[in-house]
Image: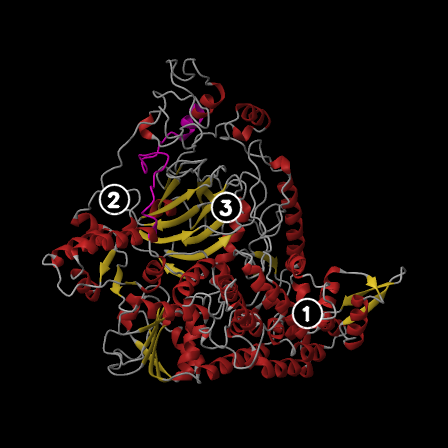
């Protein structure tokens, strides 16, 4: 499959096709048949592509159509076999407790050449391969399952137990079925007449993004670069905002140009692009196949006793540093010399593990005379001791004499010397420890990004002292032009509401500490849960010592609440304290995780908050004012509920394009179907589990549905069965149906789906793994690609994922894309119940609490700086015309209606429009007669051909810093 064509289809909704000058006579009829196949998949051809496709030569069009259908199937996962354990799903067995007992008895006591332990009939046949279970076809009818009915493992293809079953014929839904089904947006495919030009535009847009790219974005950028400028760097813009993106592109060019005449030129360009030692490290690490963010896989600290026999620990390996050509080694050492010994030493200290590995290839002590500063920086990193009279010793003495503020020479009793680094952060902390807030602010102006990230801290320390507060705000004014827009926007958003901050009480803080201690004890006592690993002896031993492995009691009647786990209010040491004021942090890493701390900060003065937020609005509006102008800006008020892209480098690749933290209205459907599919690598068994937890309005857990409970409250939630291995080519698939009205009747308010790796194999180690949500038709197919709302990949060094949270009362969906932390073996809902309650509640309260920059904020800065007229569109179809001011746009968005009924005629005007999706855009600006150069910013979907499409990340990138800055482009924690 053409990788470039797939990237263009996924990102632009367009494909290339070149018709013949003499079109075939049946071209129109053929295109009609193709459209029928595409409509079954939820896609429709635009007019331009329909015309071109009808002119395709007969010898070419079938192959082109096969490729197009395969590409759209791949986008939703419909090109894989999606076969669950129970073929009859959603008619999963009702008496799951009795089924569990039969499975357990068969597992423990069935042996070859003996009567069935359940019915007494002669079983016959050999044990199943590879699990070894002896299965009675009478007790476990093979036509009902797709794997071993005892343990859920896929069976070898040559088995005699499972018959060959023809896949069910694709059922074409009737008109009445489709009319009664909840509608889904139709995806349009247009014609791309200039694929090379489109590839260059996409390439430049990705490189210009202000934040680091996700793994999927980097893969697409690689395809685009290889198709447009392999091994060349002349196309790079003068400023690449994201350092990780720059390092990635430089590493690709160094790879491609190796052993070619232009290699020295590529090395020279790379050195010119580096502005810090960390930039060089990113490039070398990416050159070796590592993460350009210099994020290393977490070290495995799992006790061996937690894992049963036959289940080896699977971890994500740390990349090995490649051999570096001599020109590249010398360029890196020369760049470290240019940085200076103290600056380079401080940069090396930020990523010590990476630099120690790189130093093994750089050999910094071989040519100390040529690169003395580089040698000193590595000596400070390694703690090297050397003779004072040696070349390295002389370099240390000279560097300490030259930069005594940061480098201190240490004499040792054996006559050798070493160097000790005093970092810039240490100087700042020394000033703060002496209550010198003004001095700390003055020092931080040397690092503008660090200054802005510490605004909240500095304002707290300044307190009511006018001089200290003025020193902080003056430092912010001097440095605002040199800070990336992502940092400015994040700081302003995080200060919102700080005047009303409520601190946790002493009793709540003490309860939180006791709860953490209890949790640590509970984690240390978690036993391995080893059912279904295929070792009867292990099961017998576990059953004797752990009664929880025995069958669960029957479910209580429908009118009795079940599985209610209290959340607590700070008095129960073992329960999560959710009513306590809390802060949510998003630590830097390859996947998105969070941790929560009790709120200990006092509130800030409203005047101080207002001064900083006003400064940010003025700065970003001023930057927008230097860009091309628009005659009219029309902004969707609902964008105030959509967070701007954050931490996209750790985002999962997804179909719908929902930003993390965005809230979506659920379609008018009673049933949501969750799906999960994965394929394991050769030689490693991977057991993923699709699960769901239900909470009431106070985040008390009222129930769950997973492999241990295939049905919850009858048919309120139904699981398709637990598959415990996923060998190619079939892989493994699990479904879980949620009947939303039934769940609400049972007292559920919030629903949190989960994907867990039971045997702790990280998602990164899988050949493929993806999950999603669809809206099934009544009596329709188990998996219908046309009904898929969202499909996302499982990625990263992670073993548990909470992709979303649903509010059943308001019928809203919060996209979280959140990785949960967990150690050991046997991850399931029962083990992590309290953690799930905390995580779901924290995500909901954080993202709906106004702590993040919104897409409306981004567009308000552009509208205030670039538009002659500004209108805010409301959900009721009215508009509010406001002054070109950021505050006015925000205020208008909070009202439910506007005074203007009709939009001024935009015909011929250059328009800036922003909407949640293409449908909302069409309702808000119901015309195709906008002027040339009009831009539409949509969160999901693609606007019509009359618009220049742009995404929120691109809009943020246009507000890049005006001054030279080497600061990072994203706010951490």
Label 3 SS: helix
Residue drawn at (35%, 21%) of the image: 137
- Within 10 angstroms of label 3, few (less than 14), some, or many (20 or more) residues? many
Label 1 SS: helix
Q: Is residue 79 magenta?
A: yes
Residue 812 on image: x %, y %: 38, 57
Q: Is residue 530 above or below residue 960?
A: above
Mark 3 or mark 2: which comes first in sequence?
Answer: 3
Disc on res. 778: 2
User: Along the line of sight, which residue is nearer the eye, 719 or 747?
Assistant: 719
Label 2 SS: loop
Name the residue beneath numbered marker 3.
765
Front of the two marks 2 and 1: 1
Mark 1 or mark 3: which comes first in sequence?
Answer: 1
With 694 as the anchor, is 969 left or right in this view?
A: right
**What quarter of the picture does the C terminus occupy?**
bottom right
Q: Dots 3 and 2: beta carbons under 8 Å? A: no
State which region is magenta: 76-102
Q: CA distance from mark 3 to mark 2?
A: 36 Å
Front of the two marks 3 and 2: 3
Name the residue beneath numbered marker 1.
344
């Amino acid at each position: 499959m053409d990788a470039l064509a797939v990237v263009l289809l996924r990102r632009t909704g367009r494909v290339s096709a070149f018709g013949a000058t003499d079109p075939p006579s049946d071209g129109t009829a053929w295109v009609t048949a193709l459209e029928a196949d595409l409509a079954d998949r939820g896609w429709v051809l635009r007019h331009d592509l329909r015309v071109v496709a009808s002119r395709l030569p007969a010898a070419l069009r079938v192959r082109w159509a096969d490729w197009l259908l395969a590409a759209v199937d791949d986008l939703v996962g419909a090109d894989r076999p999606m076969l669950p354990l129970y073929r009859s799903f959603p008619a999963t067995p009702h008496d799951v407790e009795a089924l569990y007992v039969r499975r357990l008895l068969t597992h423990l006591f069935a042996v070859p050449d003996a009567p069935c332990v359940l019915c007494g009939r002669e079983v016959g046949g050999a044990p199943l391969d590879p699990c070894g279970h002896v299965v009675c076809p009478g007790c476990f009818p093979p036509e009902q399952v797709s794997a071993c009915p005892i343990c859920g493992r896929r069976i070898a293809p040559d088995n005699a137990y499972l018959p060959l079953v023809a896949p069910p014929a694709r059922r074409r839904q009737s008109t009445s079925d489709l009319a009664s089904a909840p509608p889904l947006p139709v995806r349009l495919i247009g014609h791309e007449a200039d694929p090379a030009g489109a590839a260059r535009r996409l390439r430049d847009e990705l490189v210009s993004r202000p934040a680091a790219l996700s793994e999927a974005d980097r893969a697409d950028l690689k395809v685009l670069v290889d198709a447009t400028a392999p091994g060349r760097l002349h196309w790079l813009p003068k400023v690449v905002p994201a350092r990780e993106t720059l390092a990635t592109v430089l590493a690709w060019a160094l790879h491609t140009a190796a052993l070619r005449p232009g290699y020295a030129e590529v090395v020279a360009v790379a050195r010119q692009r580096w502005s810090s030692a960390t930039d060089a490290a990113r490039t070398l690490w990416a050159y070796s196949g590592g993460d350009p963010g210099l994020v290393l896989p977490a070290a495995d600290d799992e006790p061996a006793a937690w894992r049963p026999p036959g289940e080896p620990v699977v971890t994500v390996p740390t990349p090995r540093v490649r051999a570096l050509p001599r020109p590249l080694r010398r360029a890196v050492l020369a760049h470290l010399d240019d940085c200076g010994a103290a600056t380079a030493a401080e940069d090396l200290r930020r990523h010590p593990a990476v630099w120690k590995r790189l130093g093994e290839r750089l050999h910094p002590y071989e040519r100390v005379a040529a690169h003395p500063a580089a040698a000193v920086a590595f000596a400070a990193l390694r703690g090297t001791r050397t003779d004072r009279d040696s070349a390295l010793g002389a370099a240390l003495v000279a560097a300490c004499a030259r930069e005594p503020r940061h480098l201190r020479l240490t004499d040792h009793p054996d006559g050798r010397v070493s160097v000790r680094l005093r970092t810039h952060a240490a100087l700042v902390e020394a000033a703060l420890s002496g209550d010198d807030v003004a001095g700390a602010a003055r020092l931080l102006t040397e690092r503008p990004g660090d200054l802005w990230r510490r605004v909240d801290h500095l304002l707290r320390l300044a307190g009511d002292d006018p001089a200290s507060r003025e020193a902080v705000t003056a430092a912010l004014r001097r440095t605002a032009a040199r800070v990336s827009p992502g940092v400015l926007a994040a700081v302003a958003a995080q200060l919102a509401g700080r005047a009303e901050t409520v601190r946790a009480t002493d009793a709540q803080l003490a309860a939180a500490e006791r709860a953490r201690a209890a949790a640590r004890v509970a984690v240390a006592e978690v036993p391995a849960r080893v059912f279904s690993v295929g070792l009867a002896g292990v099961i017998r031993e576990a059953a004797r010592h752990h009664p929880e492995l025995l069958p669960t009691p029957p479910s209580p009647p429908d009118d009795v609440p079940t599985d209610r786990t209290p959340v607590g209010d700070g008095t129960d040491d073992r329960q999560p304290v959710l009513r306590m004021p809390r802060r949510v942090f998003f630590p830097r890493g390859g996947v998105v995780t969070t941790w929560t701390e009790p709120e200990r900060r006092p509130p800030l003065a409203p005047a101080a908050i207002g001064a900083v937020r006003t400064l940010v609005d003025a700065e970003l509006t001023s930057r927008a004012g230097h860009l091309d102008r628009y005659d009219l800006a029309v902004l969707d008020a609902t964008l105030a509920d959509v967070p701007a892209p954050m931490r996209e480098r750790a985002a999962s690749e997804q179909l719908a394009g929902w930003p993390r933290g965005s809230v979506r209205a659920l379609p008018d459907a009673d049933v949501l179907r969750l799906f999960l599919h994965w394929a394991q690598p050769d030689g490693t068994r991977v057991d993923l589990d699709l699960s769901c937890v239900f909470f009431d309005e106070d985040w008390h857990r009222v129930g769950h549905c997973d492999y241990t409970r295939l049905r919850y409250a009858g048919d309120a939630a139904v699981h398709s069965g637990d598959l415990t291995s996923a060998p190619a080519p079939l892989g493994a698939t699990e479904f879980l149906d949620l009947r939303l009205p039934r769940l609400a009747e049972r007292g559920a308010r919030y629903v949190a789906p989960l994907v867990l790796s039971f045997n702790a194999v990280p998602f990164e180690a899988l050949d493929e793994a993806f999950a999603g949500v669809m809206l099934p038709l009544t009596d329709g197919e188990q998996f219908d690609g046309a009904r898929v709302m969202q499909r996302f990949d499982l990625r990263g060094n992670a073993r548990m994922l909470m992709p979303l949270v649903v509010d059943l009362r308001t019928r809203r969906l919060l996209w979280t894309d959140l990785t949960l932390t967990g150690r050991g073996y046997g991850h399931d809902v029962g083990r992590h119940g309290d953690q799930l309650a905390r995580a779901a509640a924290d995500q909901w309260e954080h993202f709906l609490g106004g702590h993040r920059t919104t897409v409306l904020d981004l567009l308000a800065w552009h509208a205030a700086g670039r538009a002659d007229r500004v209108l805010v569109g409301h959900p009721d179809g009215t508009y509010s015309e406001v002054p070109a001011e950021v505050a006015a746009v925000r205020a208008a968005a909070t009202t439910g209606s506007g005074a203007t009924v009709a939009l001024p005629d935009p015909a011929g005007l250059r328009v800036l429009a922003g909407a949640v999706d293409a449908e909302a855009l069409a309702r808000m600006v119901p015309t195709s007669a906008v002027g040339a150069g009009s831009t539409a910013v949509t969160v999901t979907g693609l606007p019509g051909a009359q618009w220049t499409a742009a995404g929120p990340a691109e809009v943020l990138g246009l507000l890049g810093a005006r001054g030279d800055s080497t600061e990072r482009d994203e706010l951490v924690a």
